[in-house]
Each structure stands twice: as C-alpha cells, then as structure tokens.
Amino acid sequence: MFAGEIKQLWRYPIKGLRGESLRSAVIDFDGMAGDRILELKEPGGDKSLWGGSHPKMMAWEAAWPAQCGCADAVAGDPVLYEPSGAAWAADDAGLPARLAESIDAEKGVELRKVDREYGRVLVVFEASVRRLGEELGREVETLRFRPNVIVDADLEPYAEVDLPPGTPIRLGGHEFTLQKPCERCVLPSWDPNGANVRDKDLHRHIVKELGNHFGIYLRIAEKATVAVGDAITAQPLPR
C-alpha cells in the first residue's frame, strides 16, 4: 500500500506547550513515553487550558533533561522553559504564577497529571503538508499539527486519512494499528511558537477542503522502540 521512512519524532511532555525532538522513542499501550503526561488546569476546577484558549502557551517549551547520557530518556519531572529561555522545574513553587502571568490566565494555573485510559501517536505525512502549502500558496509548518511521528512515504497527499481503521502499519520492526484519522481543532491555525497570531485561512481550508482531518492516529499494545530513519510500511487489510 505504501512505504517510507520516519523523518522526525516529537513528544510534548506538557499538553499545549512546545515539545522536543527525539532520536528514538518508546511507545506502548499508554502512548509515547513521556508524551502529554501533564496539563494545565484552572485552580480548583477541571477546566483545561490549551493552545486554542491560551495560544501564548506555545511560547513555552517542555522537555526531559538528559538522563544517563541519553537525550531521549524519561525520568523524574520535565523541565519547562519560558520564552526568555529561563528554566523551571515542574514542581517549582513559583511556576504557576509565572505561567499564569505569561499566558494571560487570569484565574491562575495548576499543573496536573493527565488522566487517560490509553495512548496513541499522531503520524503526519510530509507529502500532505507540502500539498497543503501549495494549496494555500505558502509554506505550512509541520509542527502546527503537533505530530509525534513525521514520515516521508510514497502515498498520495491526504490519502492516509482514507485508510480503513484497523489497517496494520509497521514502524521499524513493530506492527501498529490505525485507529482513525485526526479530526482537527483550531489549534493548527495558531502560531506554533506562541506569537498569538492566528491563520484563519488555514483553519477554514482544513475544514472545508479536507473534511477537517489531517494526520492519523496509531496504537500498539506491546512495548516498541522506534527511531528516526526506521521504515514505515502498510499493506491492505485482508479481504
């Protein structure tokens, strides 16, 4: 059906903040290790803060410090970096106030663990990003879509969202299962670096011309390690 190569791997330790580029990653039933494990909430309630409501969040970055000499490891808590580059430990008592001030969160901010039943990884195809840019007449940053895996494959642009759910897709030597296409919110229309600027034409195009889908979600039950340069392949479901 198609074949290609993993070009980039990304994880986002804190939902809504910028993430970090990886050389390799462990993925299992819970998703990519270290990905989206913390989120920002309003104090005393269950309302989440996200890039669509507070786009300045994306001026902040979250990453796992290198452990044992391996930049792709996960241990302890992530470190947050504000736009100036200043680093904050996730448990620093002054962090919530600084975050709230920086992202215009008038009711304040709490950092909490994400509660979910299972994980998945978002795969975006370079050919689709290029075609989207051609249709809009300008370059589109792939990181607007907050992918975990960016691949280059011999598949027609946008064709990935038409693959049947359940299609087996191999990353490296491991078989993943296609869950569904990614239904997009408004987040890709906001500047991915926190500039508080929105590209409304991009959002309208994705909704009207692409059925509001971009990228696909994959899942796996067992533990797998994938790396930049690994092959990605897919075969049709048996009839």
Image: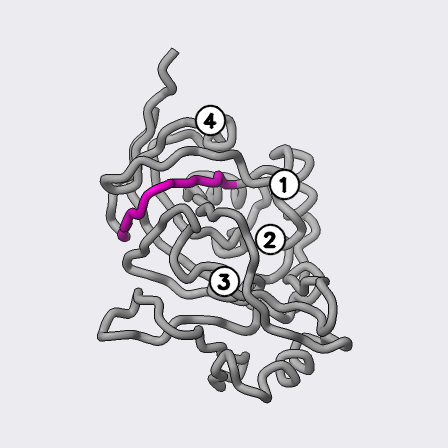
The answer to which of 198 and 221 lies nearer the viewer is: 221
Instruction: Return the residue at label 4.
Output: 163
Query: Callout 2: few (<14), some (14-19), or many (20+) C-alpha neighbours within 10 Å?
Result: many
Marks 2,1: beta carbons within 8 A? yes
Asked whether 139 falls inside the magenta stretch, the response is no
Q: Position of residue 86 (x, y in %)?
A: 49, 86
The first of marks 4 and 1 along the sequence is: 4
Element type at mark 4:
loop
Determine the residue positioned at 34% across, 32% down: 154
Q: Which tag, 2 or 4, sits closer to the chain's start? A: 4
Kindly report the distance in space between the C-alpha atoms of the residues bearing marks 3 and 4.
29 Å
Q: CA distance from mark 3 to mark 1?
A: 28 Å
| Amino acid bearing label 4 | Leu
Q: Magenta span covers which residues?
A: 215-227
Which colour assignment does the render follow? one colour
**What label does residue 43 carry, if any?**
none
Identify the mark at residue 188; answer none if there is no mark: 2
Question: Residue 237 location, x and y as percent?
Answer: 38, 19
Q: Secondary structure at mark 3?
A: loop
Marked residue nearer the N-terminal end (3 or 4): 3
Mark 3 vs mark 1: give the one in front: 3
Q: Residues within 10 Å of mark 4 (few under 14, many from 20)?
A: some
> Could you tell me which residue is drawn at 44 percent across and 33 percent down?
178
Give the residue furthest to the top.
239
Q: Looking at the image, is mark 3 or mark 4 nearer the viewer?
A: 3
In the picture, the disc for residue 206 is 1
Cβ atoms under marks 4 and 1 closer than 8 Å = no
